[in-house]
Amino acid sequence: MRLGLILPTWTTGPLRYQEVLEIAKEAEAAGFDALWVTDHVLLPSTNEELRRRAGATIHPDAVAEPEGYLEAFTTLTALAVAIPRLELGTLVACTGYRNPVLMAKMADTLDDISEGRLVLGLGSGDSAGEHETLGLPTDSPVGRFEEALQIIRGLFRQGEVDFSGQFYSARAAQLIPRGPRPQGPPILIGTLNPKPRMRRLVAQYADVWNGWQGYTDASAEVAQAAIAQIQDACREHGRDPSTLVLTTSVRVNVPGSGYRPAPDERPLSGSPSEMADVLRGHAALGVEQVQVALTMGGREGVQAFAEVIRELS
């Protein structure tokens, strides 16, 4: 099993790319296999968002600060040059923020720059408030997502697509020049408590599935239930489940971080050997990579988690 680090590219104050780069270099030295970047622009300043980020009860009069992000594809392009070995990915890129032909072109170009190390994680977006901030439509998110998937996957697989849908169209669009992989970078689709329609999209369009457990329970038992759902969906829609790569994501409560989980949240915690045992449970289910979000930012959090990586080794 491989381990990925979800880089902290978000902030309510100042943040420079150089800080993220130093964390990425520390992750490489610690033994991580992949670097992942989330895709947001500006999350609105609402108390609900503050509660989600804090994972705890807050005072009714508390005021949340808007949360800004380094742009995902720009950051990954810089990392592709600076960190020449590790896999790179989006967890996940919102198809509503960019034209799907443009997103396919961006991803294929980044795959070329990284010499075939990109995994393109895609999603419909989880913040209606952010869509409103950007002046983007909020209706029919899954319908829009499916049409974007059809265009992006078609361009990756055939190099061209002619598509006319309810939300998107692409007229004789082509990927010229092509990136290093004839089928394009693999597409990852992540799910959190997925409804049948989203499970169908995973079965039909994903090369890689991600089960997001960052806000819930990091245990292998929770992962097993989610995997069973996705594999059942594969069989229902005529796909061999063994052709779908399985990944999961968990939050790691790093000792000393001061993080207070929400009442219904059970992040990965304990001693390095206890955390390693939980991750071995994921591996036993056929999970090929676990992406971790550390509750202690900066190089210190990566250095603390390095003890877990050594346990796994």
Image: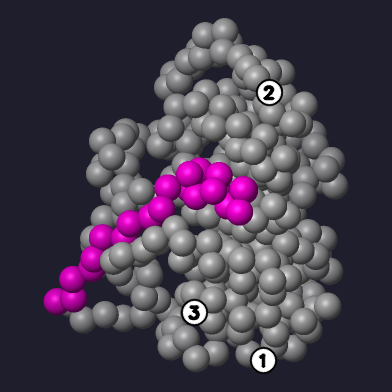
What residue sits 72% from the left and 24% below the top?
157
Mark closer to the observer (1, 2): 2
What residue sits 69% from the left and 52% below the top?
84
Please state which amino acid type lies under the numbered disc 2.
Arg
Pointer 3: what residue? Answer: 296
Mark closer to the observer (3, 2): 2
Quick one: SS at disc 2?
A: loop
**Closer to the camera in the image, 7 or 277:** 7
Please state which amino acid type lies under the numbered disc 1.
Ser
Please state which amino acid type lies under the numbered disc 3.
Met
**Mark 3 → mark 1, Cα distance in angstroms:** 15 Å
Quick one: SS at disc 3?
A: loop
Say which quadrant the N terminus sits in: bottom right
Q: Residues within 10 Å of mark 1 (few under 14, many from 20)?
A: few
> Can you tell which mark lies on residue 178?
2
Say which quadrant the C terminus sits in: bottom right
Pointer 1: what residue? Answer: 271
